[in-house]
Amino acid sequence: MTATEIAVIIAAVLVGSLVKSVTGMGFPIIAVPIMSLYTGPATAIAVIAIPNAAQNLGIAWSHRHARAQTEGLLVFCGVGVLGAVAGALTLGVVPEDLTSAVLVVAITAWVLQTLRRPDLVVRPERRSLANPLAGALAGIFQGAAGISGPVVAAWHHGLRLSREAFILSIATAFLLTGTAQIAVLGARGELSGRLGVSAVLTIIVLGTIPIGSRLRDRLSGPAFERLVLVMVAASGLGLLVDILS
């Protein structure tokens, strides 16, 4: 790669990790499509996996005080891990554009529904049944495409959790499904020769956590929700551009 390409990738990692430190999501959504232009999707997913997991661990640990405010997180993550393993096994089998297209449709439907009914809440009687289904879907997309943020964020946004509980929930979900993905990638040899780059990126993303935390404290509740909505919509747009290109 040229120096310009490397600079673009580092800039994408910095922006993505900073946005993730503020909202709890955004690193793979921003970094993977841009990196894929120069390295290919498989390499981008593999290189991002470890730094993303490290950042999720840091964010979850810094918000552990909100664990009592979460809802159904254990079941969501447990099913999500199984889905991540299944999704990772489809790499090279199911066309990546097909996986991305399905995710774009899901993102579009959620964004339109949220804009139409911004106060929409998942009904309590539906949560026990829908929670594992949402977890499985998030895990599958994490394993197959390296991007589960839109599904994870949409579900927990619908639960109307507190901001701290929302951040803890999605970071924990990303951490566990991402760890399962890393295990499968390692077993398949996808991480071979890429650990050095992953280590450098890990140092970069961990450095953005305290900065993002301070920025988040300055956001009002409505502003934070709008930022989450923008991030989900941007992820869909990014995936669509990646498919068309």
Image: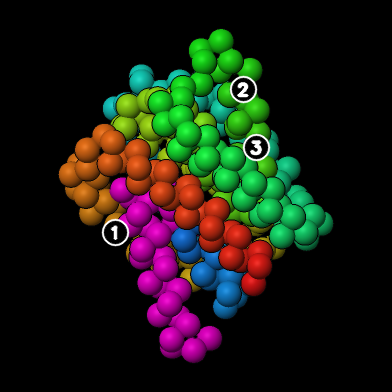
Say which mark, if any, is on residue 130: 2
Where is residue 138? Give x, y as percent: 60, 39
Q: From this viewpoint, which residue is outermost toward the right?
A: 93
Q: Type of residue at label 2?
A: Ala
x 29%, y 59%: residue: 207
Label 2 to label 3, Cα distance in Å?
A: 11 Å
Q: Type of residue at label 3?
A: Leu
Q: On screen, 131 above or below 32?
A: above
User: Does label 3 or label 1 sit earlier along the sequence?
Assistant: 3
x 38%, y 57%: residue: 17
Say which mark, if any, is on residue 137: 3
User: Does label 2 or label 1 sit earlier along the sequence?
Assistant: 2
Q: Which residues are magenta?
A: 1-28
Where is residue 142? Give x, y as percent: 61, 47
| Number of other residues with Cα within 10 Å of mark 2, as a class: few under 14, some 14 to 19, many 20 or more | some
- Secondary element under disc 1, as helix, strand or loop, is loop
User: Does label 2 or label 3 sit earlier along the sequence?
Assistant: 2
Say which mark, if any, is on residue 59: none
